[in-house]
Image (cartoon, rainbow, N blue to C red):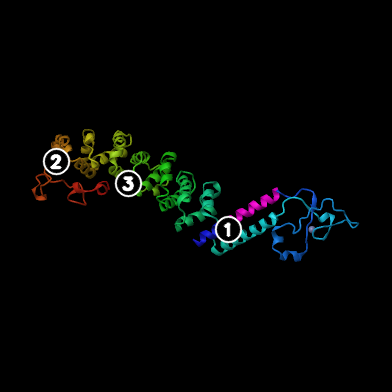
Amino acid sequence: MQELITTWTMAIASLIATLLLLLAIYTWPRGERRRCPGSRGWKGLWNPARWIRRSDCWQDLTGVPVTSTDEIRCPECGRSTPIGRVLRDGRRIRLGFIGVVLAMLGLGSQIGVAAHSGRPLKSIPTTALVLLSNTSIGAHRTVIRNEIEQRVDAGTVAGFDARRLADALVRDLRTDGRKWNASTADEKLRTMWPESQAALERELTEGDRQSRKIAAQILRDKNAAPSRSLQITCVDDLAEDWDVGARFLLSYNNRKAARYLIDHYRHASDLIRAALDSEDPQQRWLAMIICGFARDSTVIDQVVPFLVAELRDGPGNARAAAVTLFRFGPPVIEALRPYADDDDRQCRETVRSIIERLEHPDRTWDQFENRMPRISWTTHDPLSLGFWEATR
Ligand SMILES: [Zn+2]
């Protein structure tokens, strides 16, 4: 708090100093020489009134006769002044002098704080640094940005400042050839949550593919509500995206997006159903799993043939396919029946086991007539696996 007061006092002092100096230049006395300068000696400086007033007399000397030694004798204070020292008319206050003193005080204390803390911009108000961060002067790795990042870590950037800074940081998430700026921005945006949320949401529509994906990853990790643009980015995340840069910020983004879409299936069902026809095999596959985990029985006839094909002995992902089919629940039974006599033993046994488990959920392990074949090395009961284990 005390730091905040110091910062703002110094900032306001600097601002006033600048204004005073500008005003002093603008109103530079350029009238006629006719004002009595009063006392000009050093002794007069003991009087504080002399620091702000240009003259302690200011008598109008117009029409006063000039003496033989080219001096004018002031009828008010009685001092004699050489004609060249009479003051020009204009403002009565020493604006320039006050401005210089204020500027020196401000500058001096800023240098003091900077030298003491080792942070050259420590005394600059956060708002000023944030506004500069939105320009190239305050870009990644500049003194300005370093200072503001230290304040983010200290938790002192909030409200308006945080929202404006988030606007600058989300742009750093884009592909721009600069190293590590996306990584730093990712970290700071997470630190500034939830004040960074609005900027992240906006980046989902305004950003490039990399920044959209990173923004979506942060929003998902923070459990943000499923806005339409977030749903769209999540569905895009299901597709193969190894060509997108900054991969290290997108670990497990395919499965994290799938997990998120399962939880918010109600809002995004049309997008996910559309992804079932995708050109991208991984996107298609994850969309099927999402539909199963979300128990969308409207797509059963469309997806069952593909999932059953994965059950057959071979390179397919039998475990994820079996769990997905099981997750559809009883509505999937009729679609599965034709495959109960499939030529492939692993497929046949898995389908029979799923049907029995769905028809007789109350049966215990030793009562099952159809045992699950070993399609998973980690468990004897692969059908009970959750999303993360099933898709590993
Ligand atoms: Zn005078």
**Image position of 384 with respect to 52: above or below:** above
Foreground pick, 211 / 34: 34
Q: Are marks 3 and 2 in contact (CB under 8 Å)?
A: no
Left or right for 174, reference 279:
right
Q: Residue at x 47, y 54 (%)?
A: 157
Q: Residues within 10 Å of mark 2 (few under 14, many from 20)?
A: many
Instruction: Locate residue 333, reporting x and y percent.
Output: 15, 37
Residue type, numbered disc 2: Ile
Foreground pick, 230 / 350: 230
Q: Residues within 10 Å of mark 1 (few under 14, many from 20)?
A: many
| Residue identified by numbered label 3 | 256
State which tag comes first along the sequence, 1 or 3. Answer: 1
Q: Is mark 3 within 8 Å of ligand 1?
A: no
Instruction: Locate residue 113, reporting x and y percent.
Output: 56, 62
Q: Residues within 10 Å of mark 3 (few under 14, many from 20)?
A: some
Q: Residue at x 51, y 54 (%)?
A: 126
Q: Is residue 24 magenta?
A: yes
Left or right for 142, reference 323:
right
**Image position of 104 with respect to 272: above or below:** below
Marks 3/2: CA–CA distance = 29 Å
Any part of residue 342 in sight = no
Q: Residue at x 33, y 34 (%)?
A: 279
| Residue identified by numbered label 2 | 355
